[in-house]
Structure formats: structure tokens, C-alpha cells
Amino acid sequence: MSNSSSLNEFLLLAFADTRELQLLHFSLFLGIYLAALLGNSLIITAVACDHHLHTPMYFFLLNLSLLDLGTISTIVPKSMANSLWDTRAISYSGCAAQVFLFLFLFGGEYFLLTVMSYDRFVAICRPLHCSTLMGSRACVTMAAAAWASGFLYSLVHTASTFSIPLCQGNTVDQFFCEIPHILKLSCSDSYLREVGLLVVSVCLSFVCFIFIVLSYVQIFTAVLRIPSEQGRHKAFSTCIPHLAVVSLFVSTDIFAYLKPPSLSSPALNLVVTVLYSVVPPTVNPLIYNMRNKELKDALRKVISSTFFSSGSIAIALHK
């Protein structure tokens, strides 16, 4: 292949070569995808339907669940379809769309987690100013800024990556289209432009990370000053889920992109990519549900009302 203009498709990395293992991969990913779909959909429904949850924290949680749903839906269904139909192909336009959507949603999630740390800081360290600093208009603006930042971040990287001439074949050594592996197909020094953008992105991510860390240093300092044990426990219970989600998100990313070259291997890279791209959207609803009584109560109401409505409809049809 002389250049990227002659590319019609890319070949993704297969999880397995034998038919039995391909079907096993399809079944495992189907279970993970359904769990993520169910968990995030329940949170979205609970927050949208329960007026007690119409607060800044749960508004941002709803946006986080939307981003998680989009992220896992961008990469997992295609991987399942390839295993089911015993193929590795993805079209050139499909690969570009996958890169754009994944970066858009993934980047938006990181910016949203940064905004959520500010929300926790205001709620605990500036409670008297919470209604002013975190009013409905301010929350909508912050959430929109997170989505818009993810969009611009993705647009720049996608345009830069797919404007680079590709002549080193069409095999992407990953189970979905990922920029570092696409850059390996480059046949000119123009890929350095995208590398430079990636370095800038890492610096921006580091700034967001420092902001989150500083927010939580002040949060924990304020919480430890609360005289009652019950008050401290309540404050911690609103922070721990977000901190756990951030830790999972950041730690898997750091290991995926900053691990020593000596640890790199196709199998390990595949496992690490699954950890940072598939596991967080699936686990995040569980993290929030386990530590949040209000959310648990809202989910019980949603589930009970769903079954009650279904039962009533079944009885009416039976009659």
C-alpha cells in the first residue's frame, strides 16, 4: 500500500484464532457490555426520575453514565461482531469514526471527573456558597464545557492522525482503532506532529490530575475537622466513590501509556487496553451504587416500579 488514500480497511487484532475461543470472547464481552448497559441505564433512569437526586452531584453522575455508555458502545460491539463473524476487518471510515468517538467520550469523561472534584470541593469546603457556585446554570455550563472539551480534543487528534500518510500495511495491533497503533503504520516524519499533540494532551491531563489531587487534599483536611464521627462518615461517603472512579481511570491510563517498553507484549497490551477502556464503564455504576444510600433507594424505586408496572400490564393482558 503506497499511502493512506489506497486504504479501504484496517485489520484489528483478534482475541483468539480458534472458533471456540472466539465464541468465548464474544460471550464474555456480551456479558460485560450488558452489565455496563444495565448499570449505567439504571443510574440515568434513577437520577432523571427521582427529584431527590436533582442535585449537582447526581447531575454530573448522570453525565458520567452517558459518557460511559458511549465509550463502551463505541468499541465493544464491533469487537464482538468480529469474533462472531470470524473477521478482523473495520472500514477506513469506521476506524476514523471509532477513533473520534472514543477520544470524544473518553476525553469528556476525564474533564467531567475534574469538574466533579470541584463540585465535591465546593459542597464540603464551601457549603455556604454551594447554591451560588453550583447553581443549575453553572452545572449545565460545566457539563457542557466537559463535553465540548472532549469534542475539540477528539477532533484535533482524529484530523491529525488521519491526515498522516500510511504505508506500513493496514494491521492495527489492538482490538479497536487506537492512535498509537495507527501511527506505527506511518511512512513519513509527519507522525511527529501527532506525537507532539499527544505530549500536549499528557500535559493537559497532568494539570487536571493535579487539580483533582489538590481538591481532595483540601476536602480531606476539611472533613477531618468535622467534630462528629457521623458527619465525617457522611462527607467521606460522598467523596469515596468519585475518588475510586478517578483512581481506576487514572491508574489504568498511566499503566497503559507510560509502562516501560520492557513490559510491552501483544498479550499484555491487549489486557491493559481492556482494563482502561472496558472495565471502568462497567465498574463505575457498581462503585457509586455500593457507597451511596440515596442512589440505592432511588434504584430500588425504579426497579420496583418497573416490575410493578410489568406485572400490572401482564395481569391486564391475562384478563
Image (cartoon, rainbow, N blue to C red):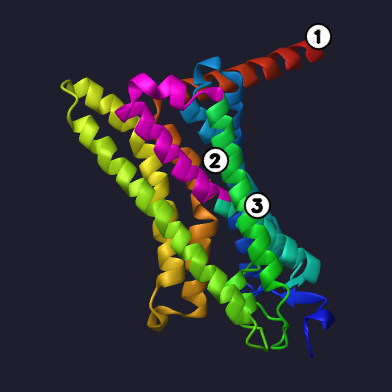
Q: Amino acid at mark 1?
A: Lys
Label disc, if present, on residue 319 of the rendered structure: 1
Magenta range = 108-136
x, y percent for residue 266: 52, 78
Structural distance between the alpha carbons of marks 2 and 1: 43 Å
Determine whether the residue tagged by mark 1 lies in a helix, strand or loop. Answer: loop
* Residue for badge 2: 64
**Looking at the image, residue 84 lies above or below residue 59:** below
Q: Amino acid at mark 2?
A: Leu
Residue 240 is left or right of residue 187, and the answer is left
x, y percent for residue 289: 44, 33
- Cβ atoms at labels 2 and 1 below 8 Å apart: no
Please say whether residue 110 is one of the residues in the magenta stretch. yes
The overriding secondary structure of the stretch rendered in magenta is helix
Nearer-N-terminus badge (2/3): 2
**Mark 3 Cα-neighbour bin, 10 Å: few <14, some 14–19, many ≥20:** some
Determine whether the residue tagged by mark 2 lies in a helix, strand or loop. Answer: helix
x, y percent for residue 124: 32, 28
Residue drawn where x is 58% and y is 34% of the image: 141
**Looking at the image, residue 205 lies above or below residue 21:** above
Structural distance between the alpha carbons of marks 3 and 1: 52 Å
Which is nearer the eye, 232 or 150?
Answer: 150
Which is nearer the eye, 15 or 92?
Answer: 92
